[in-house]
């Protein structure tokens, strides 16, 4: 049974978050496709570097907050959805990257940066770190007769 999660989107926050994502892609294209890094070449990237990731995380914090009653089914559904979005899609794109650029799959998994895919894995871990205390609270309330 799927539990509906209320999702009131704030369009200007979504737009700002999307803009920061575009800036990250812009920086990655400059670095990985053209070999430009912010230290060696003057560009807009130097200016954008000061604010793109802090702004992305700040906005993402606003978007992540949900004013809902975190029940066990909602927590389970949220983790399942995030694992599909953050882990499964990353694995698919990572595998395509491996085949296109003829890289070693396991070597990439073992590197610190995961060939650049570290962020989506870390973001999933972030969601788990936030949800674990909620889950523990719910479980202790159930055992203690709270719900």
Image (cartoon, helix red, strand yellow):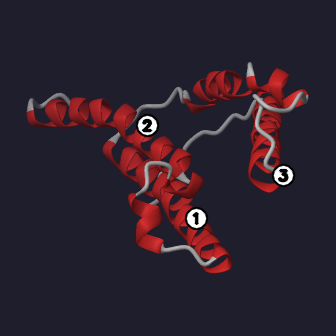
- Residue drawn at point x = 49 percent, y = 59 percent: 87
Of marks 2 and 3, which one's residue comes earlier in the chain?
3
Q: Are marks 1 and 3 in contact (CB under 8 Å)?
A: no
Q: Nearer the viewer, residue 96 or 3?
A: 96
Left or right of residue 69: residue 116: right
Helix, strand or loop under label 1 = helix
The location of residue 119, given as percent across then percent down, is 54, 45
Query: Is residue 135 depicted above or below 110 in this figure?
Result: above
Q: Residue, x 63% and y 30% (percent of image)?
A: 60
Depth check, mark 2 against mark 3: the one in front is: 3
- Taking the image as drawn, is residue 64 in sight? yes
- Closer-to-camera residue (140/23): 23
Q: Within the image, what quadrant is residue 57 found in?
A: top right
Q: CA distance from mark 2 to mark 1?
A: 17 Å
Q: Residues within 10 Å of mark 3 (few under 14, many from 20)?
A: few
Residue on which disc 3 sits:
34
Relative to 93, 75 lies left or right: left
Residue 95: horizontal and vertical position, in percent?
Answer: 56, 74
Nearest the eye: 147 or 30: 30
Number of other residues with Cα within 10 Å of mark 1, as a class: few under 14, some 14 to 19, many 20 or more: few
- Residue placed at 74% from the left, 19% from the top? 50
Q: Nearer the viewer, residue 143 or 122?
A: 122
Counting the numbered discs, the total is: 3
- Asked if residue 137 lies left or right of residue 102, the reply is left
For residue 113, the mark is none
Residue at image mark 1:
89
User: Could you tell me how far apart the alpha carbons at marks 2 and 3 are, in whole angstroms?
Assistant: 31 Å
Quarter occupied by residue 90: bottom right
Q: Above or below — where is 68 with respect to 117?
A: above
């Amino acid at each position: 049974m799927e539990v509906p999660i209320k999702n009131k989107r704030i369009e200007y926050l979504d737009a700002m978050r999307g803009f920061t994502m575009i800036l990250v892609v812009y920086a990655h294209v400059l670095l990985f496709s053209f070999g430009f890094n912010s230290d060696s070449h003057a560009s807009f990237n130097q200016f954008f570097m000061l604010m793109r990731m802090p702004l992305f995380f700040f906005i993402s914090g606003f978007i992540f907050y949900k004013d809902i009653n975190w029940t066990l089914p909602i927590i389970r559904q949220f983790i399942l959805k995030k694992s599909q979005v953050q882990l499964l899609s990353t694995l698919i794109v990572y595998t395509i990257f491996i085949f296109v650029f003829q890289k070693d799959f396991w070597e990439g998994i073992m590197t610190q940066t995961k060939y650049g895919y570290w962020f989506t894995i870390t973001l999933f871990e972030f969601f788990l770190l936030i949800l674990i205390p909620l889950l523990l609270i719910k479980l202790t309330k159930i055992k203690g007769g709270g719900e």
